[in-house]
Structure formats: structure tokens, C-alpha cells
Image: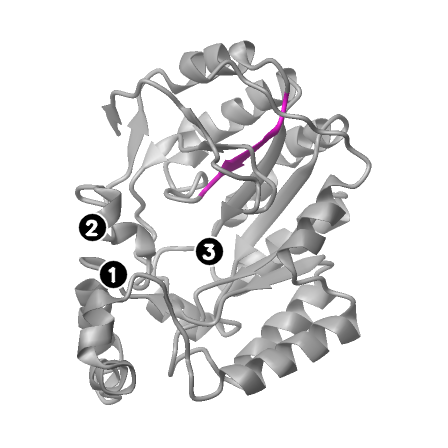
Amino acid sequence: MEYIDAKTILTKCKSTEWFGTDYNMNIYRGCCHGCIYCDSRSECYNIDNFDKVRAKKDVLPLLRDELKRKVRSGVIGTGAMSDPYNPFEKELQLTRHSLELIDAFNFGISIVTKSALITRDIDILQNIKEHSPVICKLTITAADDSLCRKIEPHVSLSSERFEAMHTLSNHGIFSGVVLMPVLPFIEDNEENILNIIHKTAECGGKFIYPSFGVTLRQNQREYFFDKLDVIFPESNLREKYIRYYNEKRIKEKLGWMSPVQNIGRLWKIFESECLKYGIIYKMKDIISAYKSGYEMSQLSFF
């Protein structure tokens, strides 16, 4: 494992709109999951050699010092730029020990991951839950394991992530699905969306937060297109993307690319089925649900 220098581990969020988090925490840099659509490869993030995982040097003493300096607690989010449960975490346990510090200093935690390894730390998550909000988000975009393996080659299979969510839910941990991205022409179909909703309900998931589309920014865009050519050689998906979304628009667009040919119908199906199974899907409702019963205020010296 290569270690890189770091001055800080926590960064203050500009707002708490994204899952109610007050701070971001990235223990690792880079990711070896190999997901073909990952936006973190984009040029704007300035991560060289993104597919190589590196750990931040002295992460635990740095985190301890930063937590000590906070006047009041808040929710710490992790997993946005690098999965905290990458394959190296099983041995290094930097995420586990970070959670122990978060527990010791009475902070909450918001985790997003594609790894079933998260269940290893249920004991600490339960401890944190005694004093602060806890939310665990399993990113799942393909209900079918065979499709999952094509577009996310080195992650826990979708079925394994559903089982992890089931285990977390059975232990009283507020858990659900982050359904993003939904890849146009690949995942934006009724069968896939319904299967994800049904499996979430079966596994005790409390929420699904969706985004029907995929980013196509500089660097990530060509990587994605090249992978489409290899994985789906007979489908001409590169040409479909360019034809449907216009090459100029693809080059300039920095936001989400929606599967415009059926977004309205898909959203109605998604919304109706979530309501049927009692699954929440609006961000404000998700935040309200997992923070219910806790009084959180956030101040820092920064």
C-alpha cells in the first residue's frame, strides 16, 4: 500500500443538503472497483491514476486531532470519492478504526459503499447509533448480477450488497440504496428499476435515492465510451449516446445526462412502486427519517 501525505482528513460541507452530512471524510484516495461510469475519474477532481488505491498517511492521529477540535458534533460522510471498504480495508482496518474514533467523540456517520464488507463494522455502527444518527447507503444500479459484473467488475455483486443491506437492517441500522447512475440504454428499463425496488423492500431497506442519468465529463467520458465499445461491442452504444445527446452537448455538459426517451414514464413507475412498498425516496424525507430522535448542531473552529 502506498501512503500519501495529508494535512486534514475532514472537510466542512458547504451545506447539509446531501444526506444531512456536515463533514466529508476520505481515508483513501483512488478506487480499484473499476466501475465504468465513475464520475470521480473526471478531470475536475484532479485525481491522478484514479484506479490505484492509496491510503492517507497518519490518518488516525490526524482524524483524532480534528475531532477533538470540533466544538459540537455532526454527521461525517464517507465514500464520496473513494470507497471506504475497498479490498485493502479488510487488512488495514483504517475505516474501522476511524469509526471507533467517530464513536468516541460522539459524531454521526453517513457511509456509501459498494462492498459487503461494511457488515464487519455493525458493532461500531450500533454503538454510534446510541448517541448519533447513522445511515448506510449501498450503491446498487443493476439488479442483475451478470450486468453488475460487466459494469462494476471488482465490487461485491448486487446480490451480495442486497444481503449486506438485509443484515444491516436486521441489526437496526438505517440502510437503503443509492440508485445512481442509471445508465441510459443499459439500466433505464422498467424491469431493472422494479427489481431493485422489490429487492430493497425484501431486504428491509428504508429508502432508495435515484438519479436517472450519468455524468460525461472530461476524462471520464472517453473512459466510459471505450468500455462500452469493449463490453457491448454489438450495441453501438457510443454512437447512440452521441446521436441522442449531441456530441457538442456531451463535450460541454457538466451535469446529469437523462435518458430522455423514457424518463417521465420511469419516474412514475419508480415513485408509484416506492409508495406501494413504503420506501422513501426524497432527500429531505431520508434525512428526516434517519436523524429522527437526535438533536444535532454543528460548530467548528474552522
- The residue segment tinted magenta is 73-79
**Residue type pointed to by label 2:** Glu
CA distance separating discs 1 and 3: 26 Å
**Residue type pointed to by label 3:** Ser
User: How many residues crowd around disc 2 within 10 Å: few (fewer than 14), some, or many (20 or more)?
Assistant: some
| Residue denoted by label 2 | 43
| Residue denoted by label 1 | 217
**Residue type pointed to by label 1:** Arg
Image side of residue 135 versus residue 159, left or right: right
Residue at 47% across, 63% down: 180
Q: Give the secondary structure at mark 1.
A: loop
Contact, mark 1 vs mark 2 (Cβ under 8 Å) = yes
Foreground: 92 or 24?
24
Viewer can see residue 173: no
CA distance separating discs 2 and 3: 27 Å
Residue 302's disc number: none
| Residue denoted by label 3 | 156
Measured as percent of width and height from the top left, residue 112 is found at 51, 47
Measured as percent of width and height from the top left, residue 85 is found at 45, 41
Measured as percent of width and height from the top left, residue 90 is found at 44, 35
Residue at 23% across, 89% down: 234
Between disc 1 and disc 3, whose residue precedes?
A: 3
Quarter-of-image position of residue 109: top right
Relative to 106, is 228 above or below?
below
